[in-house]
Image: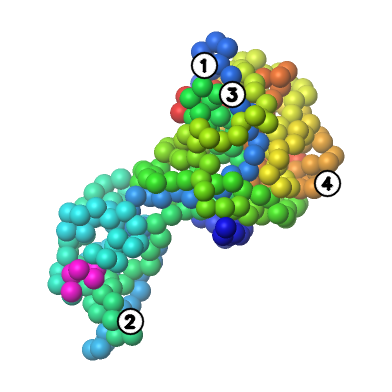
Amino acid sequence: MRKRYFFLTALLFAACFFCSGTSTKVDAAGCEYYLGGMPAGFTLSQGGAEVIGLNDVSAQDGLFRPAEKAGIKAGDCIVAVDDIRVKDISELNAALERSKGNPIKLTVKRNGETAETEVTPVKDAKTGKYKIGVLIRDTLTGIGTVTYINKQTLRFGSLGHSVSTENFSELGIADSKVYLCSIVGVNKGTRGRAGELRGLFMNDKPLASADKVCEDGLYGTFDKNYDFSHIKTVEAAPVSEAKIGKACIYSTVDGICPQEYQISIVKVDANQKDNKNFVIKITDERLIDETGGIVQGMSGSPIVQNGKLIGAVTHVFLNDPTRGYGIGIEKMLEN
């Protein structure tokens, strides 16, 4: 069993964002959901090799920058070489080796548009490998909270907001997985500085697959062999049923088991088109003592009022970590 630490400060997406419509039918009557609150590690594949930087290739006769010369820019996603699909770094490297230094055609996605360009790989003097002078990533990895799992379909929703500040959703995701995660530490939130959960991926066997990233969260399907016997089930309710007053969230700030924490809903706005249908305040002293309030990694923590799932935590107020925003659950269920 391999164990891997992923600290949110180093991640390419944070599982809780910072902040300085008319209500729709939630779902079919009587539909039940497994209540989330459990932490999960997400590894999202873009279905290509994203360029995050350009560099020199040191050849026998000097320094070269083939990708830059071909017009490649940081943020481009290389999806094919000579019309053969490239899904990750290893496939790109294999295609470069096949070139033997001859010109190749790259198919690149940029800002949602697809273009082609020709580049000539250069043989690196030290490694003997053919390179084009790019720094590449093919996955985004981080920690967040599962909000719900549909009891019948096993479709899940999590996070409640977009995965990153980058336009990652336009690139799409492929072969993306969700893993069991244990929270092993907390950096407490303070006024002016967001805190964070520190998590450990427990093993390499995924709990679920992810297939959709959008402004309202990350979605996919849980493995049917997952043990749901210990998970509470609830019905969902639209924002129109939410009231100012007492409620609770389910979140995990230590280990793998969610705990119930008391909050107060201080504002409800069913017509807010962003992911900010609720303003919430943490009132549970246990959670305040442990985390200082809402921290990165708690996004997706389900909000429950009167026994029904009404939303999920999405953002924290930087000037007051005990306060934050929540999204109405119907927005997540639409996805």
Q: In this view of the protein, which residue sits in the foreground, 180 or 310? A: 180
**Gap in angstroms between the C-alphas marked 2 and 4:** 52 Å
Q: Can residue 135 be seen in this view?
A: yes
**Gap in angstroms between the C-alphas marked 3 and 4:** 30 Å
Q: Mark 3 points at which residue?
A: 33
Quarter of the image where the N terminus is located: bottom right
Q: Mark 2 points at which residue?
A: 127
Dot 4 surroundings within 10 Å: few (below 14), some, or many (20 or more)? Answer: few
Label 2 close to label 4 by CB (< 8 Å): no
Residue 68: quadrant of the picture = bottom left
Label 1 close to label 2 by CB (< 8 Å): no
Numbered circle sitting on residue 289: 4
Q: Which of marks 4 and 1 is nearer the N terminus?
A: 1
Q: Is mark 4 on a helix, strand or loop?
A: helix
Q: Does the magenta stretch include residue 154?
A: no
- Residue at (52, 16) in percent of width and height: 27
Amino acid under label 3? Tyr
**Gap in angstroms between the C-alphas marked 1 and 2:** 57 Å
Amino acid under label 4? Asp
Residue 83: quadrant of the picture = bottom left
Give the foreground label among 4 and 1.
Answer: 1
- The colour scheme used to paint the residues is rainbow
Residue range highlighted in magenta: 96-100
Residue 174 image offset from top left, x and y in percent = 37, 45
